[in-house]
Amino acid sequence: MSWGIELWDQYDTIATHTQKGIDFCERFTHFLKDRCSIELKYASELKKLVKNYQPKKKEEEDYQQYTWAIKFWDMLKELHDLAGQHEVIAENTQSQVLKDLQSLITETKQQRKKDLQEGAKVQDHLKSSYSQLDKSRSKYERAFKMAEKATDDYRKADADINLSRAEVEKTRNQMMIKNNQCDECKNEYAAQLQQTNQHQRDHYTQQMPAVFQQMQGMEENRINKIKSMVKQVADIERSVIPIINTCIDGMVKASDGISAEEDSRAVIDKYKSGFPIPNDIPFEDLSNASVIDTSNANGTPKSSLDSRKGTVSDKKRNKKDKKGGGGLFGIFTSSKGEESKEDFSDLPPNQQRKALNRKIDEFKKEIARETAEREGMLKMKDVYVNNPALGDPNALEKKIEENAQKIDSLQAEMRKYQGYLTNMDVKPSPAGHRRNSLSDDSISQSSTNMEISQTSGPPQTMHNEPEVYTDEEFEEERAVELREKPDKKAIDDEDGDHPEFDQTEGDFDDEGFPVIGTCRALYPYEAGNEGSVAMTEGEEMFVLEQDQGDGWTRVRKHDNSEGFVPTSYIQCHFYDQDEV
């Protein structure tokens, strides 16, 4: 299959066709440039998107413990890598395909121009041969006509009897000359015709086919190059598909790593306060409040307990209401305006324990780092001692000493925080410490139970699980109590006027409570619970804290031991009743 044979008469058509091929190459160039621009823009937009949704420092601190946030950030990383692969597609297309395509266009244009010039030269040569043939044929036609005329003139002269012999002979000679000239022109025409036919055969069988073959090779080379480049573009994209698939697999893996159970557990770990659930709110029996017998051991009559605005629980409730931390959900709130204390006692117990453990882990890491640095300096000192030419071992003494001091300081700090943690784990939670303020009528209910117990024997006590709140709250309540009742007896822990009471599992460093009344034991009681104290029947004691509705009253015995006793086992008299 050859253009020279099949398309011997389509020279102009072939020239137009090859130009269209070059035009296509240029259009393909524009396509690749636009494709690269789109890939780069897409990659840029993806990276911009990833940047906009990257976690801020505050968000990272808040959400770094949740799988849904961590895995979303992992997905963003995979998306960033995926965007990079689109940049690779654009860069490789520009550096490989576009460069080769531009070279192909230049080469094709030059080859086409050369072939067209050669074809034009061959065409001109054939046209010149045709022109020579036309000239010789025209000359032969003129000579033939003149020879015919001379022959006719001779025949007429030979037939004319009026002409002399000399005139007839002259006409015959003229005829002979014209015939000879005609024969010469005929021979020239025949020779030129033979030469032109040879040129024409060579033109259509050798010269032009050669030109067409060159142009066909040029066109086929262009087509093969286009084919190779299209495949190269596909191979460039195919080469990044494994990485893109890896990025997609990473996204799938990130989605598989999201766990609702772990996130729920993380929410618990982060926000769990460690406080128990508040007890039930007691029933307010207003009909029994007016008939409560509150006489003391000496028979002193007691007035009604309708007004107890000076109690610890009321002051605590009022104080919390002012701070906006009162109510059932006050246990979940914290004052961000206050600075965190060194032992994190301002945090709920569970959060305090976690904060202390984190602090201890930080000290351990720092100590390990400093210890490794110290070991390195000691080894270097040994090397200097064995080979003084390498360095002076005394130069390291100061650094080693500073390192030792730093390690001792870190260990001391770590022991301090370990002590905080130990005290927190060992410290008991005495009954009656409450974070929620209950109704005043709960005391009326306890007093009613007390009065009933005087006539029916020792009641069956209900040992409710005590709730806990921090020592700082009791310290603040005590300060308020002292300001409002300066004439009452108070315990000054800073001066050490009163010793601490003993607990079953160790010392309980609690702040003192003001004495708000007296009580007498109606029945004997053996301390069986943590934070409670034993008492004998008829024993006189000081009341430090009223019953908060859980059936326990905080008292101090004459030996300065403090604890909780069942409210139904004692008969109370409060100082604020005397002020009414």
Image (cartoon, helix red, strand yellow):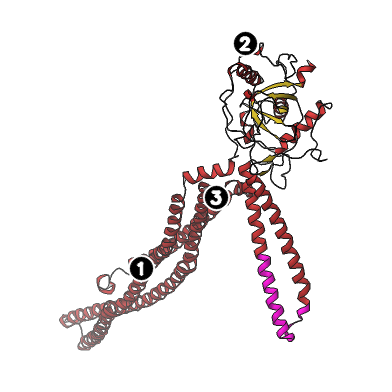
Q: Farthest residue toward the front?
A: 537
Residue where numbered disc 2 is placed: 287
Label 2: few (<14), some (14–19) or many (≥20) C-alpha neighbours in 10 Å: few
Residue 236 in which image quadrant: bottom left
For the C terminus, give its image quadrant.
top right
Q: Spatial distance from mark 2 to mark 3, Cα to Cα?
A: 70 Å
Q: Is residue 289 left or right of residue 115?
A: right
Q: Position of residue 410 (x, y in %)?
A: 71, 60
Label 1: few (<14), some (14–19) or many (≥20) C-alpha neighbours in 10 Å: some
| The one of 153 and 552 positioned closer to us in this rendering | 552
Question: N-terminal of the two: label 2 or label 3?
Answer: 3
Is 392 included in the stretch rendered in magenta? Answer: yes
Q: Spatial distance from mark 2 to mark 1, Cα to Cα?
A: 107 Å
Question: N-terminal of the two: label 1 or label 3?
Answer: 3
> As shown in the figure, which amino acid type bears the numbered disc 3?
Leu
Q: Secondary structure at mark 1?
A: helix
Is 433 included in the stretch rendered in magenta? Answer: no
| Residues shaded magenta | 369-394
Q: Secondary structure at mark 3?
A: helix
Q: Secondary structure at mark 2?
A: helix
Q: Are marks 2 and 3 in contact (CB under 8 Å)?
A: no
Q: Position of residue 37 (x, y in %)?
A: 51, 57
Could you tell me if residue 465 is visible in this image? Answer: yes
Of discs 2 and 3, which sits in the foreground? Answer: 2
Residue where numbered disc 1 is placed: 223
Residue 9 in which image quadrant: bottom left
Above-or-below relation of 214 to 233 = below
Magenta stretch mostly in which secondary structure?
Answer: helix
Residue where numbered disc 3 is placed: 49
Q: Position of residue 458 (x, y in %)?
A: 59, 23
Label 3: few (<14), some (14–19) or many (≥20) C-alpha neighbours in 10 Å: some
Above-or-below relation of 133 to 403 = below
